Image (cartoon, helix red, strand yellow):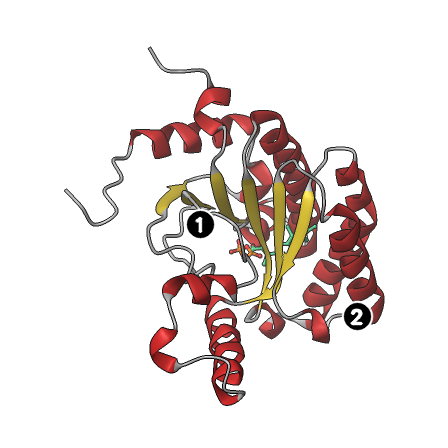
Amino acid sequence: MEQPIQELAKGLSIGIIMDGNGRWAKRRGMPRTAGHKKGAEVFQDITRYCNQLGVESVTFYAFSTENWRRPQDEVGAIMKLFGEYLVKAFDYQKENNRVVFLGDRSVLEPKHQKLMNEIEEKTAANTGMTLNIAVNYGGRPEIVRAARQLAQLVKEGKLEPQDITEEMMSDHMYTRGQKDPDFILRPSGEKRLSNFMLWQAAYSELVEMDVLWPDFTRADLDAAILEFCHRSRRFGGV
Ligand code: FPP
């Protein structure tokens, strides 16, 4: 018999690529931004559910470094939504979440940057689930950033190139100190990582699901966790 979902979910680290918002809206004859609005509601509900399940960390891909290529009104609408949820994010204090933002925030609106810094500071000592939100994030830029930071230490004579280890690289990612994702979930039927957690995903299982993100439910997360638990992870061994 299958164990209760709580037991299976406890301590997991999950990455989620929130995909399919545009298609969801198009199918309903609505503007793409309506899909993002519903997607943001699902983001909040799935965050709450992950808390209830005892998940260790969950990372949501909210906006990639490539998403700036979208029409200006769509980018503006996503950023506006993000801002609204930043204000709401103070709710997560109640849930004892540690909130961490992944990505280069320096080009975001100053008021958003201020809120992001405040939320991170206020939740830093929380002992519950870690909620990572990736905004203006790309896996390759994250690796370049880590390489630059280590190169700087070499330049300053504090580090020898041959002493650079994988652990040091991990420590220079935005997810410093966190467990790598056990699985990465991509709804909407696509089978790509799209520059998401490239360093951290080395041994993550990929779980793709044929549901658009705005339709994604708690039962879908249960199904994803069950699928992950049925996979056999060998980490390169036998
Ligand atoms: C991908 O679907 C979704 C995005 C690029 C934006 C996701 C943003 C949110 C859910 C809202 C803001 C974030 C937070 C954390 C509140 P798509 O538009 O690529 O869908 P498509 O592939 O069907 O076009």
SS category of the residue bearing label 1? loop
Q: Which residue is mark 1?
A: 180
* Quadrant of residue 110 within the rendered picture: bottom right
Distance in Å between CA atoms under marks 1 and 2 = 29 Å
Query: Amino acid under label 1?
Result: Asp
SS category of the residue bearing label 2? loop
Q: Position of residue 211 (x, y in %)?
A: 47, 39
Residue 81 in view of the camera? no
Query: Amino acid under label 2?
Result: Glu
CB atoms at circles 1 and 2 under 8 Å apart? no
Q: Nearer the viewer, residue 16 or 176?
A: 176
Q: Position of residue 156 (x, y in %)?
A: 54, 87
Q: Nearer the viewer, residue 136 or 92?
A: 92
At a point 62% along the width and 38% down the height, the residue shown is 129
Name the front one of labels 1 and 2. 1
Asked if residue 182 is positioned above or below residue 116 in the image, the reply reads: above
At a point 23% along the width and 42% down the height, the residue shown is 234
Asked if residue 198 is positioned above or below residue 119 in the image, the reply reads: below
Q: Which residue is mark 2?
A: 109
Left or right: where 192 falls relative to 41? left
Residue 69 in view of the camera? yes
At a point 36% along the width and 46% down the height, the residue shown is 206
Left or right: where 91 falls relative to 71? right
Q: Furthest residue to the front?
A: 158
At a point 36% along the width and 53% down the height, the residue shown is 191
Any atom of ligand 1 within 8 Å of the CB at mark 1?
no
Image quarter for ligand 1 equals bottom right
* Quadrant of residue 198 within the rendered picture: bottom left
On-image quarter of the N terminus: top left
**Number of other residues with Cα within 10 Å of mark 1, as a class: few under 14, some 14 to 19, many 20 or more:** many
**Number of other residues with Cα within 10 Å of mark 2, as a class: few under 14, some 14 to 19, many 20 or more:** few
**Of the residues under marks 1 and 2, which one precedes in the sequence?**
2
